[in-house]
Image: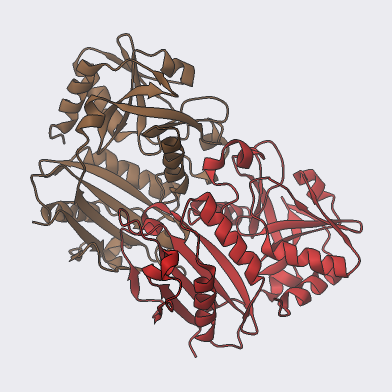
Chain colours: A brown, B red
Amino acid sequence: MPSSALILLNRPSLSAASHRHDAPALTLFDPNSPVLSALDLSATRGDGIFETIGVGHGSPQALEHHLRRFTESARLLELPAPDIEVWRKAIAASIGAIDPEAEAAVKIVLSRGVEGDNRPTGWAYASATPDYTAERVDGIAVITLDRGYRHDVEITSPWLLAGAKTLSYAVNRSVLREAARHGADDVIFVSSDGFVLEGPSSTVVYRVGESILTPGPRLGILDGTTQASIFRCAESLGLETGLAKPTPVDLGIADAVWLVSSVRLAAPVMRLDGLDIPVDRELTAQLNAFLLAVRE
Amino acid sequence: MPSSALILLNRPSLSAASHRHDAPALTLFDPNSPVLSALDLSATRGDGIFETIGVGHGSPQALEHHLRRFTESARLLELPAPDIEVWRKAIAASIGAIDPEAEAAVKIVLSRGVEGDNRPTGWAYASATPDYTAERVDGIAVITLDRGYRHDVEITSPWLLAGAKTLSYAVNRSVLREAARHGADDVIFVSSDGFVLEGPSSTVVYRVGESILTPGPRLGILDGTTQASIFRCAESLGLETGLAKPTPVDLGIADAVWLVSSVRLAAPVMRLDGLDIPVDRELTAQLNAFLLAVRE
């Protein structure tokens, strides 16, 4: 079986609710074939949204949470509300077309469509993922970088789309090049007024004593799907969980820090801004075992 | 002749200098046909750059300035330096394929390419443009909106890519929806510390007495191609030109304010944040006549 598969959603199934009773036309495409117009607003304006969903044992992980967040991103960008049943079928069909043994991921994308057409474009892309064992066990080196925004822009300036998972990720990729220049693997964004936000494609989780904490609420960051799973795992282990408003100094003196995401899962931070910080190998292994097990 | 045309640049002509001696393969495509992979980083990450170049009487306007800015955006995003001669040919070929009578524009796009391929994707798209007479003569209603960034992020936080013309324009489009909710046509971004920046696709120019001013330098905004032409026009009319660091209050008490861009040209602001401001009809007409004349 192939290691990747692409499903394009036809336009009627993406838009009007009146089409709901029709079976959606889910067509399998060669992922390397040209399928998008050069006028698609995803390509010309980064004007759309996405989710990346981990796949374990052929099953999409934290699917309901991802679909809720996808719907919330659509709301923030004033895109037509995604027809969740259609997306559920597209996700299943793309996973069904690839090797079921591999650790994999599905990316779903909803674009505003071709400029002037007023009809969205959508696709689901399933692919095998790299081996992240080293990152999950030994950890990653991370630097903090200014995100430019105050911690409260979600409230004061909703047009900045903080908290939406948009296709406009040039900055999220630029900061990884900046990290590489410092010999680091990843980044933790800090607000212009000094609060820890999130990674460019991950959520910050940290341990202080018997408490597992994450930044929030209303800091203009994504509602972490993997972070939510980790909180459930931590609670099952008898740990407390909660929201906080940490600064980088709080992370530097924490008992452990992780960047958590749907594909790499829980990557312990072993160096922060050039200083070694403790890695909790036992808890990390428990968290990743939990995340690798089929859920939902 | 058609009203639009798409040229795809083949990959060799986009990358290595070693291919420079080969004639670039410039292929004309139906703009509505699928030409991009769903894995192209333009579509999945807004990871690329663009320019929109006005076309008058079949001639690209301010072409050298646009090509310089394109090169500078590539540098800020660490994309391979564009081969300017190839782009010049693509621009000419796309213009040559459309009706020469119409006011038109060419958009050029350089994407980082398909993820993992390490080869850029590029295209030039020429199309007839709408009739902007009303905007150029009667003016536009504008609101100011917080851009979230301090005025100095270009210096403190270059990874935010302020000053690069990237494909990650979801916010630039979101603010137009916010403007529409307030009955306005366009937006002037203000830094989080209160300085006037630019429009989402235009440069701010204003008149105080006999001086024509624009925000700068080093405010994390684009080096305006149309603004530069307007300064040349103003100087030929005996006006002084210069850079300034205005606040919205300075614009509110100016003798005239314009949003200037390559396609709409000089649009006088007739209302700012709900308050009428003076429109200098005579100077506006002179500026637009100058911009509509063939240059370069």
In the picture shown, does residue A144 fall above or below B114?
above
Which residue occupies 12% across, 44% down? A102
Quadrant of the image for the C terminus of chain B?
Answer: bottom right
- Left or right: A145 as drawn, with respect to A285: right
The residue nearer to you, when weighing A81 against A44, is: A44
The residue nearer to you, when weighing B274 against B154, is: B154
Which residue occupies 45% across, 24% down? A273
- Left or right: A266 as drawn, with respect to A296: right
Q: Quadrant of residue B238?
A: bottom right
The residue nearer to you, when weighing B296 against B268, is: B296
Direction bottom: furthest residue: B1
Residue A39: tell me if it is visible: no
Q: Quadrant of residue A12?
A: bottom left
Which residue occupies 43% across, 60% down? B111
- Left or right: B8 as drawn, with respect to B134: left
Q: Position of residue B43 (x, y in %)?
A: 38, 58
In the picture shown, does residue B253 fall above or below A179?
below
Q: Position of residue B261 (x, y in %)?
A: 66, 65
Direction top: furthest residue: A209
In the picture shown, does residue B117 fall above or below B14?
above
Which residue occupies 70% across, 59% down? B141
Q: Position of residue B241 (x, y in %)?
A: 84, 58
In the picture shown, does residue B245 fall above or below A41?
above
Residue B190: tell me if it is visible: yes
Q: Position of residue B92 (x, y in %)?
A: 54, 80
* Label tally: 0
